[in-house]
Image: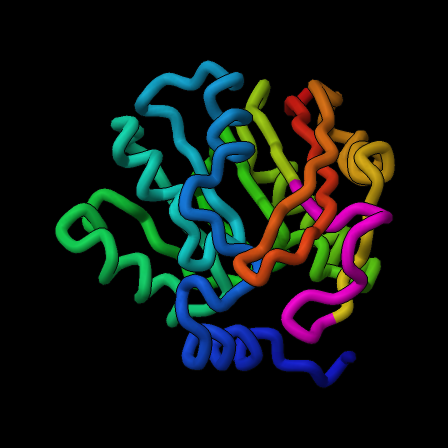
Amino acid sequence: MTDFNKEAHWQDIYSKKQLTEVSWYQKVPKTSLDFIERAVLSKNDAIIDVGGGDSFLVDHLLEEDYTDVTVLDISSKSLDRVKKRLGEKAAKVNFVVSDASLFKSDKTFAFWHDRAAFHFLTEQEDIDNYKKVVADHIQSDGILVVGTFSDKGPTKCSGIPIKQYTPQQLAEVFQDHFELVNTLIEDHVTPFETVQNFSFVCMRKK
């Protein structure tokens, strides 16, 4: 898939599919919010939602008075949806259009959240790049949460092959710079009433 244009693919998805027509839709991203709550962050700590698309996580973070929220996605169209939905509140959010594995910023984060973006990286070079990005952009003692399809989950998403992980395999990917806090295996029920099994890890920067 060396010639595959990831940005064009996701721009097309967000041009054609409505909010509830994508498998990852969650009105309330409870698992993600639970991880954030357990991290015991201050309201001014920097949080980034990587591959956030038009997720409702940012809406809930603003409702809970977090003041330093970034949403990153490769698709500008997905972020435009969020901006439209948030209205005036969108001014409180930092929106970044980028491939997560190529993200560069002077900013560092206390909490890095990635639900179902990392598993699209199937080439070792891209995985290594992502590992460097998180190591460079998460503060010392900061939290990394990554969720992917598990070894019992789908092998594709939106027509693209993904890389499955058990929680232990995920932890091993990031163990050079992070220590494991806890893991979770969870079934996500899609809007089409299919079930996707997810692996999550929560890790702390060494």
Pick the quarter of the image with the C terminus: top right
Q: Nearer the viewer, residue 98 or 60?
A: 60
Above or below: residue 154 compared with residue 42: below
Q: From the viewer's perspective, is residue 100 above or below residue 70?
A: below
Residue 164 drawn at (x, y percent): 81, 52
Residue 136: where, in percent of width, then height?
A: 60, 39
Coloring applied to the structure: rainbow
Indicate left or right for 61 with 170 as reference. Answer: left
Which of the 4 image quadrants contains residue 97?
bottom left
What residue is rendered at 41% in x and 64% in y?
A: 19
**Residue numbers of the magenta segment:** 147-160
Does residue 14 show up magenta in the picture? no
Q: Quadrant of the N terminus?
A: bottom right
Answer above or below: position of 94 versus 34: below
Quarter assignment of residue 181:
top right
Viewer-side residue, 109 vs 59? 59
The outermost residue toward the front is: 193
Residue found at x 79% / y 33%: 171
Q: Quadrant of residue 192?
A: bottom right
**x then y, percent, for residue 167:** 80, 35
Residue lying furthest left: 88
Q: Residue at x 23, y 52 (%)?
A: 86
Q: Position of 179 compared to 133: left or right?
A: right
Name the spot of residue 118 as percent of width and height, x first.
67, 52
| Residue 155 on the magenta segment | yes
| Camera-nearest residue between 70 and 115 | 115
Q: Residue furthest bottom?
A: 3
